[in-house]
Amino acid sequence: MNGTRTSGSPYAPHTDEETATMLQAIGVESVDDLFDIPPGVRFDDEFGIDARTERETRALVRDLLERNDDLTELLGRGHYGYYVPSLVDHLADRSEFLTSYTQYQPEVSQGFLQALFEYQSLLVELTGLEIANCSMYDAATALGEAATLAERVRDTSGHRVLVPDNILDGRRSTLENYVAGTDLVVETYPTTGGTVDVQTLESQVDEGVVMCYVESPTVRGVIEPNLDSIGSLIGDADALFVLGSDPVALAILERPADVGADVVIGDASVLGLPTSYGMGLGLFATREGYLRQVPGRLVGVGEDANGRRAFTLTLQTREQHIRRERATSNICTNQAWVALRTAMHVGALGPDGLVDLASRDVTRAADLAERIDDLVGVTAPVDDGHHLREFVIRVDQPARAIATDLKERGYAVHVVGDHQLQACVAGATDDELDGFVAAFEEVVA
């Protein structure tokens, strides 16, 4: 190549003349004109971070972490801090797992691929649906992928996507981002007592609806009691029925496939990860008829040349995610290591242990609600129905003030209304719940 190469990436070795020709062709004067970066976030070649020794850096980080409040978290609402067995950390932290990228070379990835296949298999068993993957970032992105899937596979002329009016803001926002640029429009349907207002939903579901999203348990912890009738009315409209749940809840609730669900989404990292408030693992399972439309990666099983069982990434090539005009999704990475941890946690619990964990979530939530309800000026739970893990509490006093007083005594709960709090038992010990009841009694006295 003639001329002097412009400094920068060795993978774009353009000469000054070539760069000038390209800029002239697109009508700009400099490469900087191609980027609209606000001055406040533009890098000015200075990070503004003083150089420190390793010892000084450790001390700085330690001091920052010590500023965190030492609270017993009873928060929930999508983030659950179940105890993760130590064997999960010890096994998942092996170098062959930590350093693995996507398992493109099956001949050197059989162990990891088998673990991912087992993860997919346990989701298939829990949901009753035939296909599951391990590529979704979190429940919100899984919901967004379900919406674009619905647009591809449904023959209806409609473009309306229905979600509950109490859906988490972050989940709704991500869904809105996913459908931007498509004909899909996100609308809400009402909930009553924490569950679906079936009569009103029925009046909204027509040929204009391409997908309807329902949660069980709901964001308020209530188990949805009308999934059969909801599934029937969504199916009659030929819309995609998407159900939000998680592996713990699915251990004791009716299988989504048995109530007509076409897709199940949620956060599978309720098992395998401590509470992370950001890092997750999106659960995505669907019917075999949509196999070629599933986003992300799938692990399949077959036989090698010697007749031995072998695992490999199957049906979707990487090129599908690079060639945007052919892609079913823009998800080109995956959550393999997090899915590995979830599979390990489920394997450690076993079928009986998983059912026991979910059953305890029901009984412990009911017990805590009963004890809170005995306090003067407090009603728990607000919503009538069975609860899993969490429930809403009504207080006569301002909820924000009650939450502040509880925080001063070492307990964190959600404020969900002027006179409503929400508490979650997942991951809390019996002693911590006893202390919470005692602190609650003090602050409402």
Image (cartoon, rainbow, N blue to C red):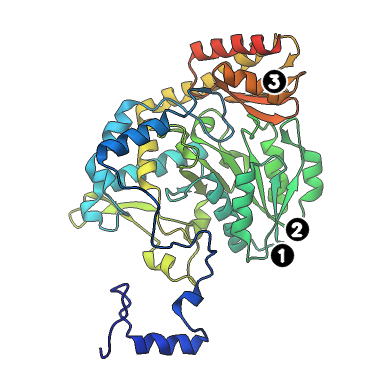
Q: Is residue 242 visible?
A: no
Q: Is residue 275 left or right of residue 233?
A: left
Q: Residue at x 25, y 50 (%)?
A: 109
- Rendering quarter of residue 83: top left
Nearest the eye: 27 or 280: 27
Of circles 3 and 1, the one toward us is 3
Looking at the image, tell me whether mark 1 or mark 2 is earlier in sequence order: 1
Looking at the image, tell me whether mark 3 or mark 2 is earlier in sequence order: 2
Question: How far across and down, in percent of the image, does residue 431 sit?
Answer: 49, 11
Identified by mark 2, the residue type is Glu
Question: How far across and down, in percent of the image, does residue 357 sit?
Answer: 47, 23
Question: How far across and down, in percent of the image, does residue 74 sit?
Answer: 56, 24
Q: Residue at x 48, y 70 (%)?
A: 324
**Placement of the N terminus among the 4 image quadrants:** bottom left
Q: Pointer 1: what residue?
A: 157
Nearest the eye: 180 or 249: 180
How far apart are the alpha carbons under marks 3 and 2?
37 Å
Q: Residue at x 46, y 29 (%)?
A: 67
Nearest the eye: 239 or 57: 57
**Placement of the C terminus among the 4 image quadrants:** top right
Under circle 1, the secondary element is loop
Callout 1 touching callout 2 (CB < 8 Å)? yes
Q: Pointer 3: what residue?
A: 381
Under circle 2, the secondary element is loop
Q: Is residue 11 above or below residue 270?
A: below
Q: Pointer 2: what residue?
A: 207
